[in-house]
Image (cartoon, helix red, strand yellow):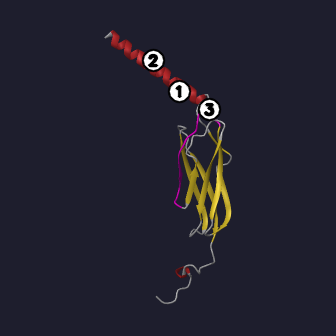
Amino acid sequence: MKKLLLIVTLFMAGTGFYTQAQAQNSKTGEGPKLSFDDESHNFGAIKEGIVAEYTFKFINTGDQPLILKDVRPSCGCTTPEWSKEPVQPGKSGKIVVKFNSAGRPGKFNKSITITSNIPEDTKILFISGTVTPSTDNSSDPNQSPLRIGN
């Protein structure tokens, strides 16, 4: 019984030291860190039908490689592209975001959620702007404001 108690005590102490060391590592800044130049972009006014593009630049300011696991837009009209390779400490990377304005007149606000190998740190980027409606209805006669007949 004493041996079992000793083993359990040593196991608990070892687990406590490991947990404390992990907490200390996160406090001292060890691990990857994702730092963006800017986390939002306003395209301003863009014409309907245009695919607007913006590049978000970032730096891994941590001391371990940064891996972007997923970059997910809030809707299908926004498409992100990013490198799947790890970003080494001190190196930079980019996320290219494309917004397809076709059929989307009016104001827009979209988000892009980034998950990485940084625990507890999900970053969200934002794009916004206003799509000016196209006045060219020649491509689709059903889009005319006035329909005559059936």
Query: Among all residues in the image, which is located at the extreme bottom?
Result: 149
Q: Which span of residues is magenta-colored? A: 61-76
Left or right of residue 1: residue 137: right
| Residue identifier under label 3 | 63
The answer for how far apart the CA atoms under marks 3 and 2 are is: 29 Å
Identify the amino acid type marked 2. Answer: Ala
Instruction: Please report contact status of discs 3 and 2: CB closer than 8 Å, yes or no.
Output: no
Image quadrant of residue 50? bottom right
| Residue identifier under label 2 | 13
Q: Residue at x 66, y 66 (%)?
A: 46
Tell me which label, 1 or 2, sits earlier in the chain: 2
Tell me which label, 3 or 2, sits earlier in the chain: 2
**Front label number (1 vs 2):** 1
The answer for how far apart the CA atoms under marks 1 and 2 are is: 14 Å
| Residue identifier under label 1 | 22
Residue 114 position in % (x across, y down):
55, 47
Query: Among all residues in the image, which is located at the extreme top?
Result: 2
